[in-house]
Structures are given as structure tokens and as C-alpha cells.
Image: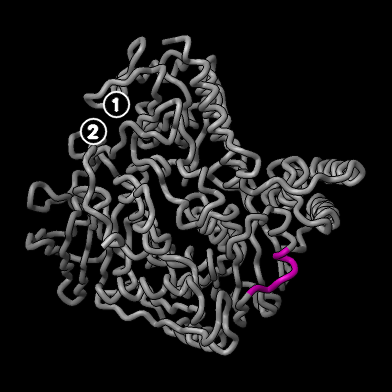
Amino acid sequence: MQAQRPVLLLIILLALRGSAADRVPPYGLELSASDKAALVDGVARLEGELGKIPAGAPLLPEVKIFHKAVDWAVSHREFYRSNEVGIAHKLIEQGIDRARSLAGGQSPWTQATGLVVRAYVSRIDDSIQPYGLVVPPSFTAEPKRPRRLDVWLHGRDNFLTELKFLNDRQRSYGEFTPPDTFVLHPYGRFCNAFKFAGETDVFEAIDHVRRHYAIDDTRISIRGFSMGGGGTWHLAAHHPSFWAAAAPGAGFAETAEFQRIWTKDPKPAWYEQALWRLYDATEYAGNFHNCRVIAYSGELDRQRQAAEIMAKYMAREGLQLAHLIGPKTEHKYEPATKAELDRQFTELLKEERDPFPTRIRFTTYTLHYNSNYWITVDGLQRHWERADVNAEWIPDQKLVRIATTNVSALTLRTPHESVLIDGVKLNGRTAAMVKSGNRWKPAPAHDQSLRKRRGLQGPIDDAFFDRFVMIKPNGASALYQERFDHAKEEWRSQFRGDPIVKSEDGVSADDIANSHLIFFGDPDSSKLLARIAKQLPVRWTHDSFRMGDKSFARDKFVPVLIYPNPLNPRRYLVLNTGFTFCEYGRSSNALQIPKLPDYAVLEIANPQNVALAGFFDEEWKITDRSLSSLPPSRAAR
């Protein structure tokens, strides 16, 4: 048996590596020796200027982004057109100019109008992420007056490196430039349809803009086209109370029908179908009761399907979608219809948005998306099944009336003296409440129980929305080392940041307190895993491991999972995997969705062969129900 192990490992190493053609972004042009030497010299000159700036300078990332853009393009062979060598030299000089200004105590770009590129340090991995900004001319005369912020999400471009993005964002104003309005162009960490870390990037970029400019929080809107239209659909549906209005153009709104899944074989596993509910905007259509939306499609565009299916699902919720169609137009804006769209969208934003509406409807399938205005869902009876909250605040009676489905805990942020929830009246200013059996009661003050809650509900990919640290394998087998190397490189390539990597001995108390920990190994190779092994849902023996009531040979299978970290149950522990859809980077964005649930057992010889998979229950336990299939998605009907 052991003699076969090296052969099996070789097979999985080759499978994990894939071919060079599969890399995202792809390998680009081979630079001439002279071009590469000149760029390396330019990067070194910029690095020298960076060394003259204090390390903690708040604006330092806005200089370093020029270094990253060129250095990564050179180091990772990410030049795709011959003119990009000249663009790289211009970015180097721009970075040097900024560095010298900042070293001298100046930052002229922070007061500039027109096209400006800025950057921030992401909480996820300490990487520097860029964004573009259109600053209105009126900013110069009245810099402190709050203004509207329009977020524009870009389309798919597999060559959109930082180098190309910085150049584009200093050449083009984009599709829409409303007067007296800031327009934010997030990078979105490349081409993931503004999902996962790309979604986090949108909000981190907005926060950075808010810190540096006066923004009217009641007039933050979102638009996008193609991939950006898909991003607009899901961000508006998932965060209805954040946006004043949304205008998705083309794109996609769900996976199954857009990809014609039911006409192809093999069909996705039951848990993958359940996980479509993370990003299928169709499933959250009812949330547009509290978010105004106007859709655009070209009459001849296949992606017209996105608005049409959203219209169907919104109609089921008693809503009518405003849908403008550009006549005889394929995948672009038709000029006259675009002008009408802009006019209607501007009119929407002139209307005052009530920051505290008296009626709320909210739908979710996961605690990752758990709030709408003054309602926060703190617990579900069962994840990945539809949960609803219909709530009405009646100010003159100081009463909140609520009807729920599949909700086990929630919090209110309203001034009230009583709550009527599912027919149960709670007197007093109860803010947090839980469901016990069929009745509601005030929630305990400090609930420390191990249960699924916001930011601790899975699936595996949930760990990569927020700060994480990858633990370097120490003396582990080639299998674990390769899985680590693969996860690290795919994160850098597809999410444009070097993950934070530490040895076990380098993991600090701050890491445990504030980061999800990503392990590659087992208790034999990891001291930390050995220390907490008895508190994990995997049980290892010399030659096997057990998940639930099933046993697997260690030389043939590997466990992967997400679980509350026993060292700090408010953060995750992830075992033996990075994000789960890395092999779909070159595919449609509609397929960039979680491929594994909370836990799985993979065959070493063929990692696509999933021997076991499921969701932990709401108390993070493996049960017969957690291994069974969920009801089919509505998109499948």
C-alpha cells in the first residue's frame, strides 16, 4: 500500500499545477533582455524613493501601488501588448513623482479633480489594492460639501492587471460621469464579478473614499455593465439598504439558467446547487422592495437574460422591474437608451431616500447576508433554505410587528416599547430576541454558545472574505506542501495579493484573535493541529481518519473543512484548502462560485472525486441531515 503513495502524490501534484495556459491572468509576452533590464532598473529607482518616506505614512500605499503594478507585471510575465512597456515606464515615473512629493510633505493628487488613481491596504491580506476615482470639478471650490457617490463596476478583462487598470483609470472617464458626483471605479481584485474578496474590495474602496472625501451616505449608488452588471445585481440584492439605487446592465443574475446547466452532464452535486444561493440574485429578489433598481439590456444581447429572469423572480415577490432595452443593439449601450437610463437614474437619486423606512422585507439564505436597514438576522433555523423577515415599525404605537420564516434570532434597531413577532408579544425595549421552540423571547446578554452566526457560518470560501493567515506546512508530506503552494499562488494570481504566510512558531496572539487560520497538514505534521485535534470534527488514527461515522484511509483521501477555531471560536480554522473554485478562473464568472460546502473528503489520486461532503448543522455538528441534499433551488424549477 505505501509503495503506491509516491505515484498517487505525483498524480495530484500534476493535477493541482495544471497547464500554463490555465493560469489567470495568462502568461504574457516575453520581454527582451534590454526592456526587462530597463524596467527592473526603474522599479529599483522607485523603490529607492519609497525608502525616503516614513514606513507608517498613511498615503504610502498610494505610491507603492505604482511599484506593485510594474514589479508584478515584470515578475509574473504579465505584459500583453508591446505598448505596455512604455506604460510601465510612465507609471514608474508617476510613482517617483508621488514619492518625492510625499517625502516633502505634499500629496497633490488628494486635491486633484478629474481622473485620479488611489489605493489602500486591504484588511484581508495586507495587500495594496488600487481604485480609480472621478473627482468632480466642483470639488475644488467646496471640498467639504457632501456629494453623491456613484460606484461603477467594470466588465470582464482577463488581462486587467494592476498595470493596465492604473493606465485605464487615468485615460477614460467611463460610461457615466454625473455632474457634481464622485464616481468610484473599484478594481475588484481582478475579474471575479465583485464576489468574495472582490466584494470586500468594493466596500473597502468605498470606505477609503469616505475617509478622504465628503460623501452623502444617503446617495451612494451602483452601476455596472456585463461582468459589472452581474456584480451590480448581486451587490444590490444582498445589501439593499446600502444603496440609494442600482442600475445593472447586461451581465448575469444566477448560475443555472444563464449557464444552461440542466442541458449538460454531469449535473452539479447537491451541495454545489445549494451554494448557488450565496450569489444567485434571483433568490434575493424580494429585497428590491427596499432598493430601487433600473435594468438595461441590448435587444440582441444574450445577457438580456439577466434582467428577464430577475423580472420573473421580482414578479413573484409582487415587484415590477423597470427594464430599458436598447433597440437593435447587442452587448453595449445604445446611445439614446443610455441617455434615458441616465436621466431616470438621476431622477431616482433626487428623491430623498428614507434612512429609516417603516416597512422592511428581507430575504436571505445565509447569515453572511443578514441585515436590511434596522433588522439584523442573527440566526437561522437551517442555512441555505429561504429565510424571510417582514417587519413594520409603527412609531405612534411604539410597536414593531414582525413575521419570520426560518429565522431563529434577530436584532432590532428601532425606538419601540413592544414587539409583536410571529404572534408573540414581547413588552419592553427588547432589541435582541431568540426563538425557543415555537416562541420568541429576549436573547441572553452574552451568548457564547458554539453556533452559526454572522462571519462564522461557512462555507469554506467564507474564510477568504476577511483577514486570514496561511500556516506554512512544517515537515508535512509533499501532498500538503503542494496544496499549500497551489492555494498561495492561486490567491496571488486571481485575487491579486500575496497571502499572509507564517510558520507555526510565528503565529501570534493577534493572529489568533483577528485572523482565520488556514492549515495544510494533520496532527502528525502540525503542533497546533495536534494541540486542538480533539476539538475538531476529524478524528485521526495512524492510518485513517474519521468524519462523522465514516472512516477513510489517509494514504488515499484528504479532509478539507472550515470550522470555528478552537483557539478562538470567533474565527475560522480552514484545513487543507484555499478558495474552492480556483480552477474556474478562466470560465464564466457565473461559475466562480463555491464548489465545496463546510467539509469534504477528497480522493488524493483525483481531487475532483469528492467521497463525502456536507454542511455542519447550526451548532457546527455533523448530522444525518447535514449530509442530505437540500430542496432544489428555485432557479432549477
Residue occupying the point 63% across, 51% down: 129
Q: Which residues are magenta?
A: 168-174
Graded by Cα atoms within 10 Å as few (under 14), some (14 to 19) or many (20 or more), the crowding at tag 1 reads: some
Q: Which residue is mark 1?
A: 537
180 relative to 604 in the view: left or right: right
Q: Which residue is mark 2?
A: 621
How far across and down, in percent of the image, does residue 375 sit? Answer: 28, 61
**Foreground of the two, 270 or 413:** 270
Give the image quarter of residue 185: bottom right
Graded by Cα atoms within 10 Å as few (under 14), some (14 to 19) or many (20 or more), the crowding at tag 2 reads: some
How far across and down, in percent of the image, does residue 140 sit? Answer: 70, 76
Any magenta on residue 329? no
Give the image quarter of residue 117: bottom right
Mark closest to the chain's N terminus, 1 or 2: 1
Does residue 221 show up?
Answer: no
Q: Residue furthest right?
A: 34
**Foreground of the two, 9 or 440:** 9
**Up-down relation of residue 343 to residue 500 (above or below):** below
52 relative to 439 in the view: left or right: right
